[in-house]
């Protein structure tokens, strides 16, 4: 498969948008929303999650030229102990075996498409995998972060490309 590198005119890239749940404006004109899949996924309670990226791509092989974006949002799947039919897998996807290489490649791609002094916002829930194991996969250390959620297992972190 040949991947074309695309020059973009938008400032922000969300590499794993899923249903754009944490965005206040899910149609923000400054953002390119990406995901590896597109479709509607029915949950066990009959709600429907609509995954509708602007660009269908794998976050480990982004089709954008180097240093294209001022801000990149990286919220990859974080669960490996669920089945493909679980609600969380339908909403956000799930980690496969070899997740370390996948997340490391994702970090590398996010930093590749970030401009110098660009910001990476990273979100991770350590339900299955501790945050320290994930941060070790990044070529750049985080500047700061914040824990959230009922059990404080969701981490939001900010990185800056030098």
Image (cartoon, grey):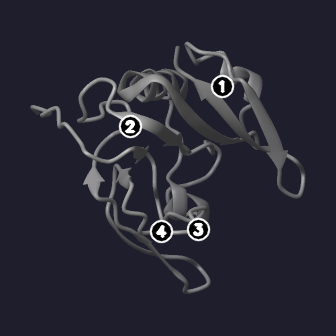
Q: What element carries label 3?
A: loop
> Which residue is depicted at the point 17% across and 37% down?
6
State left or right for residue 25 relative to residue 59. Answer: right
Q: Is mark 4 on a helix, strand or loop?
A: loop
For marks 3 and 2, the one nearer the N-term is 3
Q: Quadrant of the N terminus?
A: top left
State left or right for residue 52 relative to residue 81. Answer: left
Identify the residue position indicated by label 3 in the image.
24
Distance from Cα at disc 3 to Cα at disc 2: 22 Å
Task: For marks 1 and 4, give the one nearer the viewer.
Answer: 4
Q: Which mark is residue 26?
A: 4
- Tell me residue 121's x, y (percent): 59, 38
> Which residue is depicted at the point 29% across and 23% down?
66
Distance from Cα at disc 2 to Cα at disc 4: 19 Å
Task: Kindly indicate whether the residue at mark 3 contacts the one at mark 4 (C-beta within 8 angstroms).
Answer: yes
- Tell me residue 147's x, y (percent): 83, 43
- Tell me residue 70's x, y (percent): 44, 35
């Amino acid at each position: 498969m040949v991947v074309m590198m695309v020059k973009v005119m938008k400032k922000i890239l969300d590499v794993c948008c899923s249903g754009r749940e944490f965005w206040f404006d899910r149609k923000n004109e400054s953002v390119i929303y990406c995901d590896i899949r597109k479709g509607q996924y029915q949950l066990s309670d009959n709600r429907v999650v609509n995954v509708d990226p602007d660009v269908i791509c794998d976050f480990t092989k982004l089709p954008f030229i180097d240093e294209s974006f001022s801000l990149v949002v990286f919220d990859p799947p974080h669960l490996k102990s669920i089945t493909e039919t679980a609600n969380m897998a339908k909403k956000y996807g799930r980690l496969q075996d070899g997740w370390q290489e996948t997340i490391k490649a994702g970090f590398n791609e996010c930093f590749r498409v970030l401009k110098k002094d660009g910001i990476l916002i990273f979100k991770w829930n350590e339900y299955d995998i501790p945050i320290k194991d994930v941060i070790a996969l990044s070529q750049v250390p985080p500047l700061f972060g914040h824990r959230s959620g009922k059990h404080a297992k969701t981490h939001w972190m900010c990185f800056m490309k030098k």
